[in-house]
């Protein structure tokens, strides 16, 4: 049979987005624990002014600390994952240059709102994370991340009884919002849910390696505003044309290497 010339030559890049506090870093830690024995992994974290998420993952001992790199965006979290992805692209390329051939590079967005999505120029697949503590109705609020990311993860399901959330209903409504798209109800304490998540990652990686996976753009950010530097006023804009949109804020820049 002829060789598949469309197969990629670099690691698959997986974006992890979602609001603040939904457990993106703990989800990545769970993936690293489960997959580091079989896959060569790297992680890039995004924070506005700190490297806190990278520090958390390093302290958790889930991966060689040198394989975890922080990016300090210096601006709204979506800036470095959608508007100008240069800092994250450079960080991903540096990881592969330093460690040779990697299988998977996981890129964590800073905590943003329901409209946050990655540019397909940065990641090959993306998952969007909600948590039950945010309320069972949040899946019905929609947005491009919930509706069109490659996978929706409903995280911290073990907290459902304590916050009055029917997890099964939330997962069902998530599938309805995604018109049957993939949903994983996840708890880091539930091995079966972890197997579902890692199974999805393995399947997506296999399709990527075979050249059968095409990055999908979930859609641009919804109109929103940013406060001025003094915290007052602001300006409303959209990201319909990410190639030409600019922010009057500090540019994204890579933080110090791990």
Image (spheres, rainbow, N blue to C red):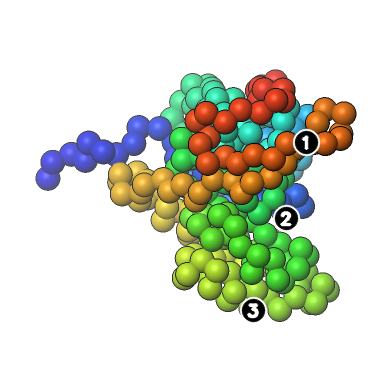
Residue placed under numbered mark 2 in the picture? 22
Classify residue 105 as left or right of residue 59.
left
Residue drawn 40% across the image and 32% down it: 10
Front-lying residue, 78 or 44: 78
Q: How far separated are the C-alphas under marks 1 and 2?
A: 27 Å
Distance CA(mark 3)–CA(mark 1): 38 Å
Verify CB contact (< 8 Å) between mark 3 and mark 1.
no
Rendered-image quadrant of the C terminus: top right
Q: Quadrant of residue 114?
A: bottom right
Percent x, y of residue 143: 60, 57
Secondary element under disc 2, as helix, strand or loop, is loop
Q: Secondary structure at mark 3?
A: helix
The numbered mark, 1 or 2, whose residue comes first in the sequence reads 2
Query: Which residue position holds label 1?
Result: 234
Which mark is nearer the camera, 1 or 2? Answer: 1
Relative side of 237 to 105, left or right:
right
Image coords of residue 142 (percent x, y) = 61, 62
Percent from the top left, x then y, of residue 236?
Answer: 69, 40
Q: Please say if the residues under marks 2 and 3 sit with CB atoms less than 8 Å apart.
A: no
Q: CA distance from mark 2 to mark 3?
A: 18 Å
Measured as percent of width and height from the top left, residue 187 is found at: 68, 64
Q: Is residue 178 above or below residue 224?
A: below
Question: Which of 51 and 61 lies nearest the eye of the viewer?
Answer: 51
Residue identifier under label 3: 169
């Amino acid at each position: 049979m002829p060789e598949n010339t469309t197969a990629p030559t670099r690691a698959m890049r997986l974006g992890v987005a979602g609001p603040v506090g939904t457990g993106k870093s703990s989800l990545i830690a769970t993936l690293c624990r489960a997959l580091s024995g079989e896959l060569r992994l790297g992680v890039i974290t995004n924070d506005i002014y700190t490297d806190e998420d990278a520090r958390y993952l390093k302290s958790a001992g889930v991966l060689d600390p040198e394989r975890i790199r922080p990016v300090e965006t210096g601006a709204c979290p979506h800036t470095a994952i959608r508007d100008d992805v240069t800092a994250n692209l450079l960080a991903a390329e540096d990881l592969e240059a330093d460690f040779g051939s990697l299988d998977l590079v996981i890129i964590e967005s800073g905590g943003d709102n329901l409209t946050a999505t990655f540019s397909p120029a940065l990641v090959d697949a993306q998952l969007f994370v909600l948590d039950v503590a945010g309320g069972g109705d949040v899946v019905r609020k929609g947005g491009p991340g919930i509706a069109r990311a490659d996978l929706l993860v409903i995280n911290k399901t073990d907290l459902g009884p304590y916050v009055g959330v029917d997890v099964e209903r939330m997962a069902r409504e998530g599938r309805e919002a995604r018109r049957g798209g993939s949903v994983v109800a996840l708890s880091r304490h539930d091995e079966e849910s972890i197997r579902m998540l890692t199974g999805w990652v393995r399947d997506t990686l296999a399709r990527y390696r075979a050249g059968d996976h095409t990055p999908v753009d979930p859609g641009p950010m919804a109109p929103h505003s940013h406060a001025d530097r003094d915290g007052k006023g602001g300006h409303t804009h959209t990201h319909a044309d990410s190639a030409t949109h600019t922010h009057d804020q500090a540019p994204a820049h890579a933080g110090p290497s791990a």
